[in-house]
Amino acid sequence: DAGITQSPRHKVTETGTPVTLRCHQTENHRYMYWYRQDPGHGLRLIHYSYGVKDTDKGEVSDGYSVSRSKTEDFLLTLESATSSQTSVYFCAISPVLTASTDTQYFGPGTRLTVL
Amino acid sequence: DQQVKQNSPSLSVQEGRISILNCDYTNSMFDYFLWYKKYPAEGPTFLISISSIKDKNEDGRFTVFLNKSAKHLSLHIVPSQPGDSAVYFCAASAIGNEKLTFGTGTRLTIIP
């Protein structure tokens, strides 16, 4: 199993509060991704990183920011959480850029509830 | 706009029989397709993939078929086992695009 951990695994917060989710890897992979999973939508890409301090937006990036100051850590921040951000969040890592490989590994997920 | 569609949210199959999960796509630029399997409280794990230059890829009990003209792929599991009960996601990527587009998932239940 790829060494990916996510913290916290569960979080309940209130609307308007800031929230930071952490993804930590021990594989030294260059590429890291944040997805959210919602019923009826599958997994959707929020942001991704192609190196330290290099990040880009995915298809559902509004309301989210990311930071990557070290290879092993990729942080996802909800500046002011809303109920629409209640979801399960998955981090993924990959050693290569192209998605045309079988090498994107997912973490165990963080279940976030915004009341 | 859902570019990758899995129209069956759920499927129940008797143990030992064949499970067929379907996926349709709309983007003709997609050239690589993957299936992921997800158990509750875990992240998705890669199952099998197929390139657009092929129409079939087999790995043990799992076979993926690709029909490019119909923009359709399917995952066959035979024989189905109780451990196959999970949510299955179809995903696709386009040439030169490092991002995966996922379908909505199909929950497969294998009945003992």
Image (cartoon, coloured by chain):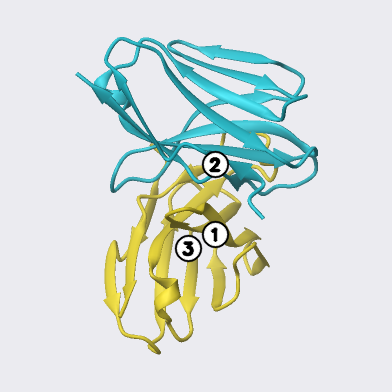
Chain colours: A yellow, B cyan
* Mark 2 element type: loop
Q: How far is mark 2 from mark 3, CA to CA?
A: 16 Å
Same chain? Circles 2 and 3: yes
Which of discs 2 and 3 lies nearer the camera? The answer is 2
10 Å crowding of disc 3: few (<14), some (14-19), many (20+): some
Residue name at image x 32 percent, y 45 percent:
B42
Which residue is pictured at 56% across the width and 36% down the height? A103
Please say if the residues under marks 1 and 3 sit with CB atoms less than 8 Å apart. Answer: yes
Same chain? Circles 2 and 1 = yes
- Say the numbered circle drawn on residue A73: 3
Density class for disc 1 (Cα within 10 Å; few <14, some 14-19, many ≥20) is many
Of residue A33 and residue B93, the one placed in the foreground of this image is B93
Taking the view exactly as shown, the residue that stands out farthest to the left is B112
Pick the front one: A90 or B19: B19
Q: Which of marks 2 and 1 is in front?
A: 2
Determine the chain carrying the residue at label 3: A
Q: Quadrant of the N terminus of chain B?
A: bottom right
A97 in relation to A67, above or below = above
A12 with respect to B63 (left or right): left
Labels 2 & 1 near each other (Cβ < 8 A)? no
Amino acid found under the numbered disc labelled 2: Gln
Residue tagged 2: A104
